[in-house]
Image (spheres, rainbow, N blue to C red):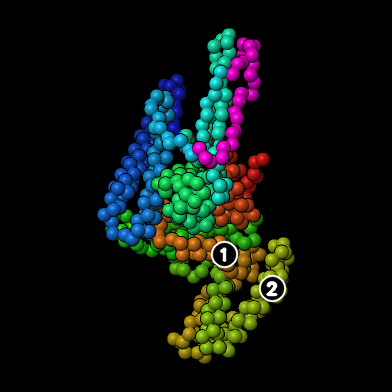
Amino acid sequence: MVGTLQVMVIDEQALSELDAEQLREVTQRLLTELRHQRALNEKLAYECALLKRLKFATQSERHSTDQRTLLEEELDSDLAAVAHEIEQLRPAQPAAQKQQPKRTPLPTHLPRREVRHEPTSTTCQCGCQLKRIGEDVAEKLDYVPGVFTVERHVRGKWACAKCQTITQAPVAAHVIDKGIPTTGLLAQVLVAKYADHQPLYRQENIFGRAGLAIPRSTLAQWVGTCGARLQPLVDALKTEVLQHRVLHGDETPVAMLKPGNGKIHRAYLWAYAPGAFEATRAVVYDFCESRAGEHARAFLGEWRGSLICDDYAGYKASFNQGVTEAGCLAHARRKFFDLHVANKSQIAEFALTQFARVYEIEREVQALAAPQRLQVRQQHSRPILDALHQWMVLQRQQVAGNSATSKALDYSLKRWTALTRFVDDPQLPADNNWIENRIRPIALGRSNWLFAGSLRAGQRASAVMSLIQSARMNGHDPYAYLKDVLARLPTHKASRIEELLPHRWQQTS
């Protein structure tokens, strides 16, 4: 199963055959693993205690009603995610008999749909015919947008009169063990929160109008658990994205609440995607506390390829470490566009005309194979850009050093090599618009946000949004994708996790 803890197991006989040096090495590895697990447990325990303190101290924080509502639901999600991670770290233990809390029955007025589970064979191993002696019934809450229904899972009990054995279909694995929501309801909550930007307190009201007001604290726990269970899938998506030679990169600010003092500060959501001419359609978001370049370096790791990005200084250190800078021609054009809008500059008008000629060629080569694209660019775009560069150099010598025109010219002249690198590499697009279109839905959704309640909440949001946006890029309905993946994930082999990635996903019948 995905997410299970890997524990080092050593055969006793093999251990006895080790010499002293090998035994010391094995002992050292075990001690290192033990220290790592202990540190991770202490970190999660501390984070859990901090989240509980924030949750139960929220009434003393000076926030508005809406702010307090959003913070509380994020804390519940964080607590559920931390609890799941702690549970995964615990070694397997025999199931203990403990009293299960009584759950309030689901409303009787909701429609019911029975799903029957029976053994594949009603013949006992001894050869006798089994007799039905009863059944177990478990109810799960399902949701079709606007309509609640209840699934009645009836597991018949079959007994053999001769050997006194009982046969019953096993309980199907679920992303939330012993929980009431179906994967359809979980997918609806995730899509509404992260694609439609509906906070949980609004979803609570929407569900109330449909017949059952699910407490936002319960919704938050579902979100936190689903975020933790989906994380291995997002990690696999990141690994695949970093296998491409050409990447786009961009970032957008998101307000985040600092724990402890209740103040808001500016965090950033970074986005990375394979190049527009790459075969894989995917995007991975990375939520970070700041815009520092160290976050980009941490995400890219050992990756060395061509990164299309704007002129933000945070990427410069990566360029010094072997990453190739590819500039954004749209950013250079935008400088002259703003100049032309401001004062109808003739210099800006001429530059815009030349940029338009280059973009006309780019539209023509979009559907061409890489060799043909390179040939057309070399034959037609190169002369236009070379002439434009010479013209910019001459114009720069004639304008004042601190004028708006000089700033527009300097932006292009100082970055000319990076801006025109696409002419010599057919896999490079001319600009960074591909990733800007991937990050635009996030920017539009900010109108419904007050802030991210915590760093963990922001990271969970970025993970789920990575899957939702990647599903959209591949033409999938995010609801159908998440519903199917959440149903398959609990029993899916970790070694085959890539089969569930949006660009490889095949919906089950």
Q: Main secondary structure of the magenta part?
A: loop
Look at the image and say whether residue 13 sits in the magenta stretch: no
Q: Secondary structure at mark 2?
A: helix
- Give the residue displayed 45% in from the left and 50% down from the top: 204
Which is nearer the eye, 80 or 68? Answer: 68
Identify residue type, mark 1. Asn
- Residue 330: x %, y % from top left: 57, 73
Identify residue type, mark 2. Ile
Q: Mark 1 vs mark 2: which is more N-terminal?
A: 2
At label 2, counting other C-alpha atoms closer than 10 Å, the crowd grade (few under 14, some 14-19, many 20 or more) is some
* Mark 1, residue position: 437
* Mark 2, residue position: 361
Q: Residue furthest front?
A: 109
Which is nearer the eye, 33 or 17? Answer: 33
- Give the residue displayed 42% in from the left and 35% down from the top: 103
- Residue 61: x %, y % from top left: 28, 56
Q: Which residues are magenta?
A: 108-132
Which is nearer the eye, 57 or 202? Answer: 202
Look at the image and say whether residue 116 sits in the magenta stretch: yes
